[in-house]
Image: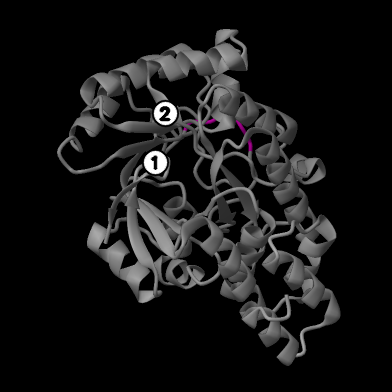
Amino acid sequence: MMNNPTLSLFQTAGIAPRLFNIAERVLSNERINATDGIALFEEGNLPFLSLLAETVSQRFSNNHVYFNRNFHIEPTNICVNHCAFCSYRRRKNEAGCWEYSIDDIVEKVGSYKNSGATEVHIVGGVHPDRDVYFYADLLSAIKNTDPTLHIKAFTAVEIDAMCGQAGLTIENGLKLLKESGLGSMPGGGAEIFDEKIRLKICPDKTGSTDWLRIHKVAHELSIPTNATMLYGLIENYGHRIDHLERLRNLQDETNGFNCFIPLKFKHYNNLFSHIKETTTVEDLKNYAVSRIFLDNIPHLKAYWPMMGKQVAQISLTFGVDDLDGTIDDSTKIYSMAGSTEQKPSASTEELINLIKGAGKIPAERDTVYNIINVH
């Protein structure tokens, strides 16, 4: 391995033996363990982490950075849960709440029919009166409106609740949703898997074991999914690595995750507003360590409406190979929490220029990472 130019560079730079050993294994495509992951967080500087993360990223993406043409629909922000970090949730009849009907949503989908969008992303609150049959009807109505549109919809938390309301098992509920048009699932609701932290930040939300089980069932039904991690709240590096390790273990078993998306805690208008948000340095470190540790999940996404376009562009040199999509100002989840991008919308040309500006190859994709066009 000493003829590896990156490893030689690390030796010349006098990298500490512990980190040098980790780098040697990463560059040899060997799996690192949880102790190694924590060491990368605690001791790795940004140039070191960038080089390692980019090495791993190249194995999956060969210098491509992906994006798609998509839009979001959020059927409701009425939610039964009490997540302390949430700036989005409202109660019924509370100021700022909404609950769109199926007709409302179909009209919205119809407005994008000739836009070139290939995906609709649907997530929202856990509504107390809408079960899986309501959402199956919604999916069918969307498919009738635009049969070519890929529907990526519903977090594990939403699916847990809607199936429970209907008295269906997760397996039968997901089968119904798939038959109605569900193409894939987003990765939301994972937050941080550590159970003690969940008791403090989202006590009544679907637990970590059930979140993982629901995604496992989806994978077994050939429904690909994404995965997320909320960071920058009250967790430590050990909690983050534990979260990543649980995802890595499930991916070993099912190979059903397409993409991992770290989600930065935004502190505006919620019960944790007193906590300072993480720095850009910490955000980049988190991307890099996630890419290095998750050696079996092919893609790492910087969700630019949350991070802002400039930081998202910088992240492309820290292992990130996906920028999500055009979005077209169709999501409020992060703008209501004080996101950098208050009106999240990007043209295809703008995303292409961001990617090229980072020295990468822009690749327009569909939802499951088939390349539509290389720019």
Most extreme residue toward the left is 114
Placement of the C terminus among the 4 image quadrants: bottom left
In this rendering, is residue 145 above or below 358? above
What range of the chain is rendered magenta?
A: 78-82
Tell me the kind of residue under disc 2: Gly
Distance (Cα) linking label 1 and label 2: 9 Å
Q: Is residue 161 visible?
A: yes
Determine the image quadrant of residue 29: bottom right
Tell me the SS state at disc 2. strand
Image quadrant holding the N terminus, namely bottom right
- What residue would you read off at disc 2? 183
Name the residue at the top extreme: 167
- The one nearer the camera, 255 or 131, is 255
Q: Which residue is mark 1?
A: 367
- Disc 1 on helix, strand or loop? loop
Q: Which amino acid, by three-letter code, is at mark 1?
A: Thr
Horizontally, residue 32 falls left or right of residue 291, namely right
Q: Nearer the viewer, residue 352 or 336?
A: 352
User: Are discs 1 and 2 less than 8 Å apart at CB?
Assistant: yes
Q: Residues within 10 Å of mark 1 (few under 14, many from 20)?
A: many
* Residue at horizontal 80 percent and vertical 68 percent from the top: 39
Tell which of 110 and 358 is nearer to you: 358
